[in-house]
């Protein structure tokens, strides 16, 4: 073991918030499974859709859900930061301030690009627009879900905009070439965050964290692992 501390930076564990954990019992089961596999810290990143709900309304719901979950987090000694996964559509510009959606204590905004089939130029423009209006730093969620990110040229364009990137651990289940590509991106320093993006207690990824960690530790150097937060 290389002492790799894995922070799950993308989860849907807050109860009743989205298509993730349905209730606090399910949240507890997920937290138990994560803790069992050595996860010490999680980001609570419920979906936020700006065309469906105001930021204030979302924050009110999140506060209530978090109050329910807090005793469980304490019971399992699970460290956490509140956050959100923001869907990248122009409706977010209806809000003067996105600070409260950032990962707690940071200016990091976890942004989900609109579609795996979208034109990367469209996504790049939206990111530029966000940067021109708000003082946030974008973390692109699950970059492994977007086939256009497999092109090094496209990846470079995103990196040039100074966005951070998050990979879902199940990229390790993909084909050899795809997997190699993402390992290359990690080695190039493009990936700073990893996550399970876990939704339900039945998510297969939850039970495979140790296996994923072993694969990462086998392929990456200590220094490369340290580049991941
Ligand atoms: Fe997600």
Image: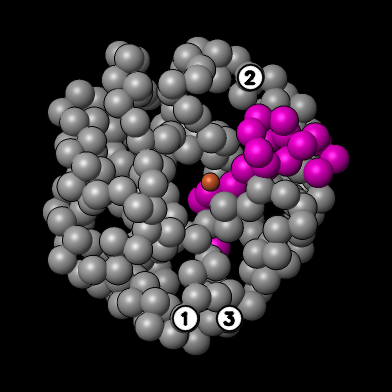
Residue that label 3 marks = 214
| Left or right of 114 on screen, residue 202 | right
Residue 59 sits above or below residue 223 on the image: above
Residue 55 pos. (x, y %): 47, 17
- The mark that comes first in sequence, 3 or 2, is 2
Q: Quadrant of residue 125?
A: top left
Residue 63 pos. (x, y %): 63, 21
Residue that label 1 marks = 175
Residue 226 appears in view: yes
Label 2, label 1: how many angstroms apart (C-alpha)? 39 Å
Q: Are marks 1 and 3 in contact (CB under 8 Å)?
A: no
Residue 57 sits above or below residue 207 on the image: above
Label 3, label 2: how many angstroms apart (C-alpha)? 37 Å
- Label 2: how many Cα within 10 Å (few below 14, some 14–19, many 20+): few
Q: Which residues are magenta?
A: 6-26
Between disc 1 and disc 3, the foreground one is 1
Residue 229 sits above or below residue 20 on the image: below
- Label 1: how many Cα within 10 Å (few below 14, some 14–19, many 20+): few
Q: Nearer the viewer, residue 35 or 157?
A: 157
Disc 2 secondary structure class: helix
Q: Is residue 162 magenta?
A: no
Residue 106 sits above or below residue 98 on the image: below
Please identify the quadrant where the C terminus is shown.
bottom left
Between disc 3 and disc 2, the foreground one is 2
Label 1, label 3: how many angstroms apart (C-alpha)? 18 Å
Disc 1 secondary structure class: loop
Q: Which mark is residue 74?
A: none
Q: Are marks 2 and 1 in contact (CB under 8 Å)?
A: no
Question: Does the beta carbon at disc 3 come under 8 Å from ligand 1?
Answer: no
Please give the name of the residue rendered at 31% of the width and 41% of the height, measured from the top-left corner: 138
- The mark that comes first in sequence, 2 or 1, is 2
């Amino acid at each position: 073991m290389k002492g790799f501390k894995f922070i799950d930076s993308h989860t849907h564990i807050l109860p009743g918030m989205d298509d993730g954990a349905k209730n606090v019992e399910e949240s507890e089961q997920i937290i138990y499974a994560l803790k069992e596999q050595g996860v010490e810290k999680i980001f609570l990143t419920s979906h936020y859709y700006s065309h469906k709900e105001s930021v204030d309304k979302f924050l009110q719901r999140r506060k209530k859900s978090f109050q329910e979950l807090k005793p469980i987090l304490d019971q399992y000694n699970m460290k956490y930061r509140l956050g959100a996964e923001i869907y990248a559509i122009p409706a977010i510009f209806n809000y003067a301030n996105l600070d409260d959606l950032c990962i707690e204590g940071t200016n990091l905004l976890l942004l989900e690009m609109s579609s795996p089939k979208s034109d990367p130029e469209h996504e790049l423009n939206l990111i530029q627009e966000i940067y021109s209006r708000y003082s946030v730093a974008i973390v692109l969620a699950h970059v492994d879900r977007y086939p256009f990110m497999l092109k090094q040229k496209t990846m470079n364009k995103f990196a040039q905009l100074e966005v951070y990137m998050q990979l879902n651990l199940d990229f390790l289940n993909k084909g050899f070439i795809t997997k190699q590509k993402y390992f290359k991106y990690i080695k190039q320093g493009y990936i700073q965050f990893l996550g399970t993006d876990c939704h339900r207690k039945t998510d297969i990824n939850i039970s495979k964290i140790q296996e994923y960690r072993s694969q990462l530790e086998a392929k990456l150097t200590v220094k490369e692992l340290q580049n991941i937060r």
